[in-house]
Structure formats: structure tokens, C-alpha cells
Image (cartoon, rainbow, N blue to C red):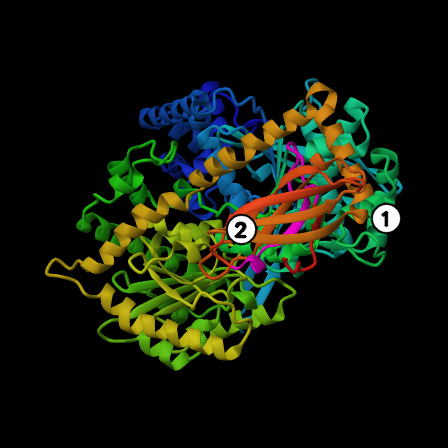
């Protein structure tokens, strides 16, 4: 793909190169300063696509030469290019905070990346998280390199027909129209990898995406050297059956790690964004094994420490599973010839019970067994994930299942409006999202009521204008009458309380909870004195008939004569639409069924724009909510899919709107400012925006995960992998002796206000340093669980490998609460992730 090859002289080469350089760097997707540049070339196309690469290739040669000859345009172009150069060359947060980290590359694998509508290779939340974190890493200077797939079609595009039914469309992603470049070898050849599949080698092309300082590499099987069937492996995101999904995940995980090696990159850390990329842990271990002539077990032990797995799935059924015969078809030879292990050993890495030959291969299990740390994406989701994954840690208390959490956040510069960006810059400075956010809350709190309320008015007006234009265009494609088009051009009102609801239409998200009582909702919307308007959008999976029916119901409701001016359902929800919605709505509504919203990020995007949240106490809102920040429904407990509870929460939703939200919005003073509403805006913006930003997320991952993972990997790899070898020997010894470990007598004496516990333990010739003997007591009401290591005494006389262990504890709860247990112990191990050995004393009757 030549750079602006369609432009010949006399367009100056320097101008051509600068335009090309800016257009192919997705930094513009979170930098409002570049908008004016592309608008001058083709304002209509820019508004529709926000793709500067398309604008450059579409604008006529004559107009391009005329516009670029204007001094004002050249000045703007020069300023933008200098800004880009300074941003890339400047020392960022990571270099200042961790100058001697020794971390060169953090590989970030994800099935999808949502960076811009100009690169439609995403479906929803997972891609949103990946894209926003990659942008934040770029801004903060964290050396993250993304690895994903280039889909020829991506996720489906949605159209609503005249009957309100969703139609799924699959337009082709023309690489020449995307802001990407082929990756080339030093000799100019296109970098192509090959992946052995049954019967032949699959060729994989590689593309590069610039995201400021960060880079994203995309793998593509649409190579002419591949058979037609295999060219389509990367055709569609989340499409096809299990076999296509497996091939995609092989390309992403195995092909992705091979790509990094081909680029000369040697990541210390590998971050798996969901289990789709879990095969990367196998390929990382394989490459380490071959480089160092080690066994696969030792290679996995060493590399595991540098792998991080983030799970986004709130239900066990959501993980990718593959039938054993399908895994055998594609991975038996890989296991035997490349990993030098048996196929059964490979299957065991993805199974709960390695002896069950019928159990499918679970990608999340592989990710856990191949990683040194696991986290969910909100505090509540961390708790849910510990419950889900407890099956891999049998007999361990749920609170000790090794899953933590890093709550998601959004990349605020991507989602703020131009007016919000200006307001934040005045309050907090131009570089506010590039550092530690230390003074954000204080500075944002000082913004005046009038400025905040004007921001809402301006953003709402912009949203209404956008909805009118878009809705007219969408109706016109359905063949609507001139009368309907004229009415659509007048839909909504600049001065009315505006609610937004946009997300994937799935039953657990309960997108029709607001429709529980249509008459009551209509009454709220059309109130003469205090009207409300509602903008909706969202897709249902093409195979989800129930989700599609919920869309049809909303479309039908919006067509009611009384509702037509107050409700609109916009089709084909995408990044560009999401930007307009989160910038313009006053209240973002979210009604998932707890705890099935792992985190949710859509409501976070309104924060920077002064929007407020009305949401179920689930995901991020469960930890963010406070009465002065927004509104909540739910009681903080799980109720399953109980229809009576849905009815209860629908009632709460209507009541909040009628009694609190609507009256507060319209309670303007003599200046027209609703002071209580604006106070909520200020509190929400100043307190929640920095907390739920991708800046905080990436810094947290860096400080708490990446640096420690890199250090742990290096420790295990140093000295020829001696620590790794010691860990393998330790685990082997544990597996050999564990079945023979047992407890002897157990006694307790109360000495004043303390207990003295005494336990006999028999270790079957195993080194006593390999284990820890502990007392454990469960959590009770406000009392946290207690874990106390017992002290080993002298060997028991006349008993082989028998020892006495003692512990002193306060007598502030019954002695019967405490149970002795034996667990694995090693100073260099990740416990209990790598060694989930545990033996409990069978309810000792303390004597």
C-alpha cells in the first residue's frame, strides 16, 4: 500500500508525508485538535466516517492541492505534526515512575480492539476495554504491544426493517480503506507467517496499526496462497461454529506469539484479555523450551510467571470450550512434536478433571494454568470469578481462590466532547490524563455551576442535531415517506431531560425493563410540564431471537403516535454513535441482571461529559455508587431471573424517574440552573471520572501486575532457570507424597486470654520446608477469615517424618472455629495458583 500514491506532484512531499503520517496514526481518534484538519478536506465524509485515511483517499487531487496550499491549513498541519512528534519523543509517566524497570515489551492479546469506527474489528465491551487500555498505555508510555486479528467483515452491521426486525449485514473491510499498513521485512517483502494446520501450512499476513506510542499488530489469513476456506478464518468476529473459532484462536495465540518473535520482540509480560488468546501460553513456553533446550514443564513453569489472565465472563457457561476430538485434530501433532508432551497432558491443561475423557477443553482453564496471576474486571466480578473458578481449587475456601480484580475504566480523551475537553482543560490543564491524576478531583470540583450546566445544554443540543440527521438517513434507507422524514427531522428537543440506553440486546441485560409498563413509561415521557426523551440503540446477536424481539418491541413503542417525538431507536450502534450518545445524554440507564454485568463501561463514558448514571448495583456501579453521585436500583443481592423481582425493579425504576430524577432536573432557580442536579454532576465528574479512567487502570496493571510479573519471570529464568527447576522438583515431590500426608492428635489449651493449639503432622519423608501447617477459621459476619501459620517443633520421637506444630491465638472466638490444614509452601511459588494442594484435618475435636 503506497503512501498517498494517488497524489502526484505538485503536492509537496513534506505535506503529503505529514498528512499520511497523521492519518495512519490513531492518535487522532482521541485528539480533538485534528478534527478541524480533516473537516476542511471533506466535512460530510469526515462526519460520516471519522476516518482520515478514507478522507485522504477520497478527496479529489484538485481540492487536496487547493486546501493544502492555504497558509492556515499548512500552519495547522505543522502544529499537529509537531504535537505528534513531541508526544512520541517525550518522557511519559512510565519512564519517570519506573526508569529502571527493565521491561521492554508487554504483549497484550485480545480477540477484538475498539479503537475507532475507522477500524471496525470489534463487537463491544471486550474490544472497548482493549482499545481504551492500549490508548492509555500509549499516553502513559507503558510499552504495550497489542496483538489481534484483522477481520474481513468484523462484527455484523445492523439494519432495522420496516417491521422493526433486525437485519444482519456483513460489509467487507477493505484494507486499503483502513488506517493500517502491511508489516514488511527488511528486504521489502510482506511479513508472512505460517501456521501448520492438518494437511498444509496456513499463511498469515501481518498488518500494523499506530496508536500514538503504542503499536497494534493484526493477523490476517486472507492470503491468496491459502485455500478459499482458510482465507476466511479471519473473516468474521464471533461468527461460524466451534471449528472456525478454534482456528481463529490458534491464529491469535500461536500465530500471535510467533509474530512477536519474528519482529524481534521478547515480551517479559503477556497479558491475555479473556481466554480466547490462551494458546499464547503454550507457544510462549514452546519457544522458551526450544531456545533454552528445556522440558516443556520447566519452560511453562518459568514463562507462567510472566503471564496475566484477565477474565471478563460472569457466568461459567460463557467460556470457550472445544470438544476433545476437535482439539486432537488441530493440536495432537503440536503437543507431541513441538511441546514434546502427550496429547493427554495437553488436554489436562484445559480440563477440571484430567481423568474425564469426555470433558471439553476449556480455554479459561488453560489461561489460568498458564498464568501467574488472574483478575476479574470489577470488585463484584472478582467475587463472582472466585466462585466460578473454585472448581479448579477443590477444598480451598472461596475467598482464597487466586483471582483478584482490576476494575475497568475508559479512555476519557476518546469519549469526551470537544466542549467537555475544553472545560476540563481550563480546570485541570492540558496534560491532565498523562500523569497520576493527583489533583483532578480538587481542580474539577472548582468548576462553576453555570459552566457545568452550559456544558450539558451544549452537549444535549449537539446530540439532538446528530440524532435528527442520522434518523432521517436511516428512515430514508427503509423507504420512509416524505411525511415521516419531515417528522424525523424534528424529533427530540434540545431542552428536555434526555435518557440514553445503548448496549448489546441480551436477556441478562434486561433492555426492556423500562418497557415493563409501557403506559407508565409513556406518561413519564409526555408529561406536559416535565417531559422526558429517550434515545436507544443496540444490537442482538444474529442467533439471539429473544434479543431481536426486544429490539422489535422498542421500535414498535417508538412508533406510537404519542411517543414518536420523544423516543428514537437508532440502528447500527457503533463507536461513532456511542461517542455522540455518551456526550449528549443527561442520564445513562443500565439494567443488567446482577451479577451478570462483569463490569460494564458504557456508563463510565458519560462521566467526563457531566452525564449521570441510573443503574443496577452491578459491575462497576456496585462499587462506584453513592447517593450524591447518581441513582441505583436493586438491593445488592442476586435474584436470578425471577420475574417478580424484575417487576419490583421496574417499579423502582419508574419511581426514581417520577419522584427524584425528573423533578430534580427541572428544579431550576432564577437563573435556570437546577443546583442539586449540578451538584451531582460536579461530584460525579470530579470523583468518578479519574477513578474509572483507563489511565488509572493501566497504571494499576503496571504497578500491581506488569512489573511484578516481569520480575518473577526474570527470577525464574536467571541462572539457567535454576529457580524454575527447583519449582518443578518441588511440585513433583508434592505430587508424590501428598496422598500419604496425614494428621495425628490435635489439642488446645486456653491460657488466660489465649489459646495454645498443638497438632501432630506426618509428612511421608517429604521435606517439612515444602509445606506450611496452618490454622484457618471462616469469616463470620463482620469478622474476616483468619489464617495463622503454625510453628514446627522437633520431630516426634519414634515416628518417621512426624512433627509437632503449635500456635498461640487470642481467645476471642471459639476454639472450634479453627481447623488445621496443610498447604504447599515455596518462597518462589505463586500460591495456590501453581500448587493447589491442601489437606484439612477432619473437624478436630480439640482436646
Residue 182 located left or right of residue 765: left
| Mark found first going from the N terminus, 2 or 1 | 1
Residue 153 located left or right of residue 61: right
Residue identified by numbered label 1: 328
Which mark lies nearer to you, 2 or 1? 2
The reply to whether the magenta stretch includes residue 544 is no
> What's the magenta region?
814-835
Q: Position of residue 471 (x, y in %)?
A: 42, 61
Q: In which quarter of the image is the C terminus?
A: bottom right
Measured along the vertical axis of the image, is residue 669 above or below residue 304? below
Residue identified by numbered label 2: 786
In this orientation, does residue 154 appear? yes
Measured along the vertical axis of the image, is residue 557 above or below residue 187? below
Mark 2–mark 1 distance (CA, rounded to whole Å): 45 Å
Q: Which of 501 and 180 is in front in this view?
A: 501
Q: Where is residue 600 in the image (x, y as percent from the top left)?
A: 48, 55
Q: How many labels does the image show?
A: 2
The reply to whether the magenta stretch includes residue 825 is yes
Q: Position of residue 460 (x, y in %)?
A: 30, 56
Q: How crowded is mark 1: few (under 14 residues within 10 Å), some or many (20 or more)?
A: some
Amino acid at each position: 500500500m503506497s503512501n498517498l500514491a494517488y497524489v502526484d506532484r505538485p503536492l509537496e512531499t513534506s505535506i503529503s508525508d505529514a498528512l499520511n503520517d497523521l492519518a495512519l496514526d490513531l492518535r487522532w481518534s482521541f485528539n480533538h485538535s485534528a478534527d478541524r484538519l480533516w473537516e476542511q478536506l471533506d466535512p460530510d465524509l469526515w462526519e460520516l466516517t471519522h476516518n482520515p485515511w478514507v478522507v485522504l483517499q477520497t478527496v479529489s487531487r484538485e481540492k487536496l492541492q487547493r486546501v493544502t496550499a492555504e497558509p492556515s491549513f499548512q500552519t495547522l498541519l505543522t502544529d499537529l505534526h509537531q504535537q505528534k512528534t513531541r508526544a512520541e519523543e517525550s518522557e511519559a509517566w512510565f519512564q519517570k515512575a519506573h526508569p529502571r524497570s527493565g521491561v521492554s515489551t508487554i504483549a497484550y492479546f485480545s480477540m477484538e480492539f475498539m479503537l475507532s469506527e475507522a477500524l471496525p474489528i470489534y463487537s463491544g465491551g471486550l474490544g472497548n476495554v482493549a482499545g481504551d487500555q492500549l490508548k492509555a498505555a500509549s499516553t502513559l508510555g507503558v510499552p504495550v504491544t497489542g496483538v489481534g486479528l484483522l477481520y474481513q467483515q468484523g462484527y455484523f452491521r445492523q439494519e432495522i426493517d420496516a417491521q422493526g426486525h433486525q437485519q444482519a449485514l456483513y460489509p467487507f473491510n477493505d484494507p486499503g480503506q483502513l488506517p493500517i499498513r502491511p508489516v514488511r521485512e527488511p528486504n521489502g517483502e510482506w511479513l508472512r507467517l505460517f501456521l501448520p494446520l492438518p494437511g498444509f501450512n496456513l499463511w498469515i499476513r501481518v498488518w500494523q496499526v499506530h496508536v500514538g506510542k503504542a503499536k497494534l499488530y493484526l493477523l490476517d489469513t486472507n492470503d491468496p496462497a491459502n485455500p478459499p476456506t482458510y482465507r476466511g478464518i479471519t473473516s468474521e468476529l464471533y461468527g461460524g461454529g466451534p471449528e472456525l473459532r478454534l482456528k481463529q484462536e490458534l491464529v491469535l495465540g500461536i500465530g500471535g506469539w510467533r509474530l512477536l518473535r519474528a519482529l524481534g520482540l521478547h515480551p517479559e509480560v503477556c497479558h491475555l484479555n479473556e481466554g480466547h488468546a490462551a494458546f499464547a501460553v503454550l507457544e510462549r513456553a514452546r519457544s522458551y523450551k526450544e531456545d533454552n533446550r528445556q522440558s516443556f514443564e520447566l519452560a511453562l513453569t518459568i514463562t507462567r510467571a510472566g503471564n496475566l489472565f484477565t477474565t471478563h465472563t460472569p457466568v461459567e457457561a460463557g467460556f470457550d470450550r472445544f470438544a476433545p476430538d476437535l482439539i486432537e485434530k488441530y493440536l495432537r501433532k503440536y503437543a507431541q512434536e513441538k511441546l514434546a508432551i502427550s496429547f493427554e497432558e495437553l488436554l489436562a491443561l484445559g480440563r477440571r478433571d484430567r481423568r474425564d475423557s469426555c470433558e471439553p477443553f476449556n480455554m479459561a482453564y488453560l489461561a489460568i494454568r498458564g498464568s501467574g496471576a488472574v483478575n476479574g474486571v470489577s470488585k463484584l466480578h472478582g467475587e463472582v470469578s472466585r466462585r466460578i473458578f473454585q472448581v479448579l481449587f477443590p477444598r480451598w475456601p472461596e475467598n482464597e481462590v487466586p483471582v483478584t480484580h482490576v476494575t475497568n475504566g475508559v479512555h476519557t480523551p476518546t469519549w469526551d466532547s470537544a466542549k467537555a475537553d475544553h472545560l476540563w482543560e481550563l480546570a485541570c490543564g492540558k496534560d491532565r490524563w498523562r500523569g497520576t491524576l493527583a489533583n483532578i478531583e480538587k481542580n474539577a470540583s472548582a468548576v462553576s455551576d453555570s459552566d457545568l450546566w452550559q456544558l450539558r445544554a451544549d452537549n444535549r443540543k449537539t446530540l439532538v442535531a446528530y440524532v435528527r440527521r442520522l434518523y432521517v438517513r436511516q428512515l430514508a434507507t427503509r423507504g420512509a415517506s416524505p411525511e415521516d422524514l419531515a417528522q424525523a427531522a424534528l424529533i427530540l428537543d434540545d431542552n428536555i431531560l434526555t435518557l440514553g440506553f445503548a448496549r448489546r440486546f441480551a436477556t441478562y441485560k434486561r433492555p426492556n425493563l423500562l418497557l415493563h409498563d409501557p403506559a407508565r413509561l409513556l406518561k413519564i415521557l409526555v408529561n406536559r410540564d416535565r417531559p422526558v426523551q429517550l434515545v436507544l440503540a443496540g444490537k442482538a446477536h444474529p442467533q439471539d431471537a429473544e434479543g431481536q424481539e426486544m429490539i422489535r418491541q422498542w421500535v414498535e413503542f417508538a412508533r406510537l403516535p404519542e411517543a414518536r417525538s420523544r423516543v428514537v431507536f437508532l440502528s447500527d450502534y457503533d463507536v461513532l454513535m456511542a461517542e455522540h450518545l455518551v456526550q449528549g445524554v443527561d442520564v445513562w440507564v443500565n439494567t443488567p441482571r446482577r451479577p451478570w454485568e462483569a463490569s460494564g463501561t458504557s456508563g463510565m463514558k458519560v462521566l467526563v461529559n457531566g452525564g449521570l448514571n441510573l443503574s443496577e448495583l452491578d459491575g462497576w456501579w456496585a462499587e462506584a455508587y453513592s447517593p450524591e453521585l447518581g441513582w441505583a436500583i436493586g438491593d445488592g443481592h442476586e435474584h436470578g431471573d425471577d420475574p417478580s423481582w424484575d417487576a419490583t425493579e421496574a417499579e423502582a425504576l419508574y419511581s426514581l424517574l417520577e419522584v427524584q430524577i425528573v423533578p430534580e432536573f427541572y428544579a431550576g432557580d432564577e437563573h435556570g440552573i437546577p443546583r442539586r442536579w449540578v451538584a451531582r454532576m460536579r461530584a460525579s465528574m470530579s470523583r468518578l471520572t479519574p477513578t474509572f479512567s483507563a489511565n488509572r487502570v493501566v497504571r494499576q496493571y503496571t504497578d500491581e501486575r506488569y512489573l511484578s510479573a516481569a520480575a518473577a519471570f526474570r527470577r525464574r529464568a536467571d541462572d539457567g532457570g535454576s529457580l524454575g527447576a527447583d519449582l518443578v522438583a518441588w511440585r513433583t515431590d508434592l505430587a508424590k507424597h501428598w496422598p500419604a500426608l496425614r494428621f495425628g492428635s490435635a489439642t488446645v489449651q486456653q491460657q488466660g486470654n489465649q489459646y495454645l493449639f498443638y497438632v501432630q503432622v506426618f509428612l511421608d519423608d517429604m521435606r517439612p520446608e515444602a509445606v506450611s501447617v496452618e490454622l484457618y477459621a471462616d469469616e463470620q459476619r463482620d469478622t474476616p477469615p483468619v489464617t495463622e501459620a503454625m510453628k514446627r517443633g522437633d520431630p516426634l520421637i519414634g515416628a518417621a517424618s512426624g512433627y509437632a506444630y503449635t500456635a498461640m491465638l487470642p481467645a476471642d472466638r471459639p476454639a472450634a472455629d479453627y481447623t488445621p490444614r496443610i498447604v504447599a509452601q515455596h518462597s518462589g511459588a505463586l500460591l495456590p495458583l501453581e500448587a493447589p494442594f491442601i489437606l484439612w484435618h477432619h473437624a478436630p475435636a480439640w482436646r
